[in-house]
Amino acid sequence: MTTKKLGKITFAEFGTIRDYPFLIGLQLGFRIGSGFSVTDNGKYTVNISPEAKLKELNRETMITKSIEEVNRILKDAKVNYVSELLNKPVEVTIEDDRFKDFRILTEVL
């Protein structure tokens, strides 16, 4: 089942994942309603290891695509820095009780 819930960004960092230093990118957390939180589960990270075997896209294409996605999110939020994403209003899509996607509520900024 897919649901859309309103919330805010409560965590926004760009960097590597502590236990997986070959994964780098934007990491987000969201507060939805009263007391419910969810993270992006690494959706906006990319494997930068030179040994990564990527079937559909080459390493450089994946890195470029990841940076372009971060740029789109920043533009939608009308900010320049990842840290400025905190408390931005969002609509989070949850599918089968897991994060699927989100969008900045540009209409209320």
Image (cartoon, grey):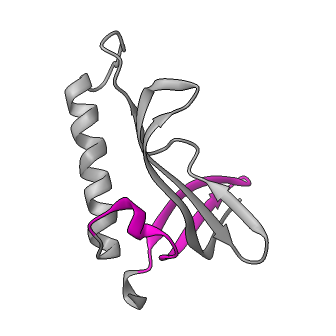
105 relative to 63, above or below: below
Q: Which residues are magenta?
A: 80-105
Residue situated in front as seen by the camera: 93 or 27: 27
Please report the residue visible at 26 percent of the width from the left and 42 percent of the height from the top.
Answer: 65
Please report the residue visible at 38 percent of the width from the left and 87 percent of the height from the top.
Answer: 109
Please report the residue visible at 71 percent of the width from the left and 62 percent of the height from the top.
Answer: 37
Instruction: Give coordinates of residue 24: x percent, y percent.
Output: 40, 35
Please report the residue visible at 51 percent of the width from the left and 74 percent of the height from the top.
Answer: 90
Instruction: Give coordinates of residue 86: x percent, y percent.
Output: 49, 70
Instruction: Give coordinates of residue 50: x percent, y percent.
Output: 30, 13
109 relative to 78, above or below: below
18 relative to 93, above or below: above
Is 33 magenta? The answer is no
Is 89 magenta? The answer is yes
Outermost right residue: 35
Left or right: where 66 falls relative to 97: left
Residue situated in front as seen by the camera: 90 or 28: 28
Residue situated in front as seen by the camera: 16 or 53: 16
Left or right: where 11 falls relative to 38: left
